[in-house]
Amino acid sequence: MRERDIFEAMIDKGMRLGALTVNEITDVFIAEFFSLDELEELIRRLQGFGIRIVYELS
C-alpha cells in the first residue's frame, strides 16, 4: 500500500471515529515512513481535517 493510500485510510478512519490515538498513528507511520518531525507534521495535517488526536479512545 502506498503512503498516500495509508494516509487517506487514516483520514477516513479518523473522520468516522472523530479521533485517532497516538498509537494508531505511530504503529502505521513512524516505523515505515516518517521521522519524528514528519510525524508531527502528519498529526497537524490530520488535525486540520478536524480529527482529534488522543492517547486513548474512551
Image (cartoon, rainbow, N blue to C red):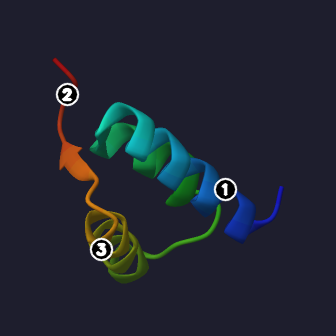
Within 10 Å of the Cα at label 1, are there few (<14), some (14-19), or many (20+) other Cα atoms? few
Q: Report the side of 28 relative to 56 (left or right).
A: right
Is residue 17 or residue 31 the one in the foreground? 17
> Residue 20, image x and y in percent?
33, 41
Of the numbered discs 1 and 2, the one sitting upstream in the chain is 1
Within 10 Å of the Cα at label 3, are there few (<14), some (14-19), or many (20+) other Cα atoms? few
**Disc 2 to disc 3: CB gap under 8 Å:** no
Depicted 47 relative to depicted 20: above or below: below
Q: Which residue is mark 1?
A: 6
| Amino acid found under the numbered disc labelled 1 | Ile
> Residue 28, image x and y in percent?
56, 48
Depicted 5 relative to depicted 40: above or below: above
Q: Which quarter of the picture shows residue 17?
A: top left
Q: Which residue is mark 2?
A: 56
Helix, strand or loop for disc 2: loop
Q: Which residue is mark 3?
A: 40
Quarter of the image that includes the N terminus: bottom right
